[in-house]
Image: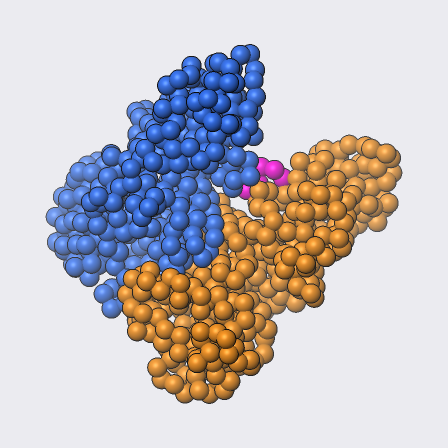
Chain colours: A blue, B orange
Amino acid sequence: MTQIALLGFGVVGGGVAKVLTENQDIIKKRASEEISIKYILDLRDFPDSPFCDRIVHDYDTILSDPDIKIVAEMMGGSHPAYEYTKAALLAGKSVVTSNKECVAKFGQELLSIAAENGVRYMFEASVGGGIPIIRPMINDLSPNNIISIDGILNGTTNYILTKMTQDGSDFSEVLSDAQAKGYAERNPSADVEGLDAARKIVILTALATGIRLDSDAIYCEGITEIDPTAIALAESLDCKIKLIAHFEKIDGKLLSMVSPRLVPSDNPLYAVDDVFNGILVSTDMLGDVMFYGRGAGMLPTAGAVVADIIDIVTHKTVGEGIRALSWKIADGNEADFSSYRCDRAFTVRGDIEDVKKYFGEPSRYFIEDGKISFTVKNMSEAEADAAVRNVSLINKFRML
Amino acid sequence: MTQIALLGFGVVGGGVAKVLTENQDIIKKRASEEISIKYILDLRDFPDSPFCDRIVHDYDTILSDPDIKIVAEMMGGSHPAYEYTKAALLAGKSVVTSNKECVAKFGQELLSIAAENGVRYMFEASVGGGIPIIRPMINDLSPNNIISIDGILNGTTNYILTKMTQDGSDFSEVLSDAQAKGYAERNPSADVEGLDAARKIVILTALATGIRLDSDAIYCEGITEIDPTAIALAESLDCKIKLIAHFEKIDGKLLSMVSPRLVPSDNPLYAVDDVFNGILVSTDMLGDVMFYGRGAGMLPTAGAVVADIIDIVTHKTVGEGIRALSWKIADGNEADFSSYRCDRAFTVRGDIEDVKKYFGEPSRYFIEDGKISFTVKNMSEAEADAAVRNVSLINKFRML
């Protein structure tokens, strides 16, 4: 039997208890032994929970108990999650987490402490909720160079954009509806401004390259400015607007960013709607691989946490076999954002001769009510910034 | 350094040599050591290959060399692949394979021999080519009960159906074109009659349940009868025809089958076109998860073989930690196919009163040129078989 402790008994923590209880038979079979929750650390007491006898308020109870081999951290936020994780690893306990903020900020240090102490730090649930992506990137894509990643990594914004597209409603209207349904938090800024997706693409970039970028420093643009004219532009080009977290290398340097993009209908991410997430990884040997599923929610996220726990239980001999991940903090590895090139779409007021003069020959264009919508292939950030200064701009989008 | 032997230097074997050579730096980094091909077993000599000095014709050279820790079997077919695999496992060598026929037929025995000998038998490349599916099912989905699987598992038939849909061409016409392009084999029967997909769903079913069905005994219907009237029916219902390998449980018993189906546009498999594969796994905790990518081809399949090799190199301590898979041969676990229920679509000649009389109230119907196309919800095989006897049938399809 393996005894574990949960840090945090909120949505994800409660989900982990539920998965371990409801599926205990299959988990016991697959882990070849029972996995039992000995402690749950939370500030609250939960007198009505069947787990009330396991609630503790003092983290030292967990740290000092040698029976506890695995700690599942589901508190969220940087502090005290980081300090608690570090203390557990130093005490020789493996840690699994759903906390993308902690992984994106402190992953390199926590992975290194884990390796030094012969334990593991695992975070399948930190990106893509229930979608297997971290472990497949580590194991299944291991013979490949990762050429690029494009992910719909935030379910809240994907839900909002899907509803705006389907119903023609305004951003603020759909946001209120999403909050009422529990798909958006009361303070939705980390989601709608793209920071949540930025943390996740930083984690995926580190898995692809071994370099951990600063999620606060990468280019990050949210969806708060998307309006019905933008939705109409997307539709006229047979595209959908999606918040895309993107990674690629430019001359050997790393470019990771988050922004709304027009996704054409022949791209597999086009069909990823509502609260679903999709992650398209382009590799040199396996080609394009996409992972799709529920990017959030109690049971999907909890299921990913439990998969990590089972992985640790079934791979006991750390240090003798299992490859430890090693991430370095970026130090001059960041590509110059102004040189980033992609296809782009614009809507401007003006005439076609101005468009041709400042943007070059458009690959497609159409004129409606004195507005010109057009696309340009392979244009850099710097070129786009310079060109739009000469026109009366209504919308501009990167394309996928 | 880990030394390996390749069995077969055809498309996949050549691809494995290419992946190991071209990506040797990244593979060495991720495996923490070099992986080197010591022998390649083939009947031919390949005097112009850079690997010509490693070609051997006698399998005993490989079997008797204690330096060889891993054998990659890429010969295809049951014999001598099965005998060679068994001999390698008994000699204490791990085996990785792309050979779905061998895994589907002899998987339970070969996994058991591997476990007894403290080595591994791995087959990521046997299903979905370059798509990570085997390892994610074993590891990432481990806390889940698998409720159902729906897979587009055969690239050849998906290419043919995509072209028939896009161009309105006949099956035989598109098949010739696919053969000319190398997407279909000269003898395409295993693909177009569904046997290839049947072997793959048998493997996925065994991963989900631990029970290995007989791929020759499951219901298997190919795409040779699909004609333009069927494509038209699909389009009129906002569906595409896909060859779907399906698994579910009926009253605790296993139902695995292969047949063409109408896939509605809101299903994520709808967008899986051309030679791509997609596998939608429905689970009780993670929800629906889909894996998408290149289901065949030299480099994708070879990449999956190399991922297995790296997995073995980085998890050396078999028996102490890694959970051995254990499959049993089905013995009364097969569900009664006639009780299988799903939504269905039909086109018949006749009048709507007959349709209502024999099929019940259709959920949708439309009449054109004296033909009635209609859908019925949740109808069993037995009910469908009985109903169609009373009408002049043009087309019938299961829906997803």
Residue B371 belongs to the span the image colors magenta? no
| Image position of B276 with respect to A380: above or below | below
Quadrant (top left/top right/bottom left/bottom right) for the N terminus of chain A: bottom left
Q: Residue at x 68, y 42 (%)?
A: B166
Total marks placed? 0
- The answer to whether residue A230 is left or right of residue B341 is left
Q: Nearer the viewer, residue A5 or B6?
A: B6
Task: Quadrant for residue A382, please give it.
Answer: top left
Residue B25 visible from this viewpoint: yes
Percent across and percent down for residue A104 are 25, 42
Q: Residue at image x 36%, y 31%?
A: A381
Q: In which quarter of the view is residue B77 placed? A: bottom right
Q: Residue pushed farthest top? A: A369
Closer to us: A140 or B322:
A140
Provide residue A211's location: percent of width, then percent of height: 26, 48
In the depicted view, which residue is nearer to us: A245 or A139?
Answer: A245
Q: Please state the horizontal and vertical placement of residue B117, each as a whole percent of the image.
A: 39, 79
In the rendered view, tell whether residue B53 sits above or below residue B312. below
Position above or below: A350 against A330:
above
Residue at figure coordinates x 58%, y 69% from the top left: B101
Q: In which image quadrant can residue A212 be found?
A: top left
Apparent side of residue A276 relative to residue B225 in the rendered image (left or right): left
Please give the range of residues in magenta: B264-268
Image coordinates for residue B160, horizontal then vertical, percent:
67, 52
Predominant SS along the magenta part:
loop
The residue located at (49%, 58%) in the rendering is: B300
Q: Is residue B399 visible?
A: no
Is B267 colored magenta in this rendering?
yes
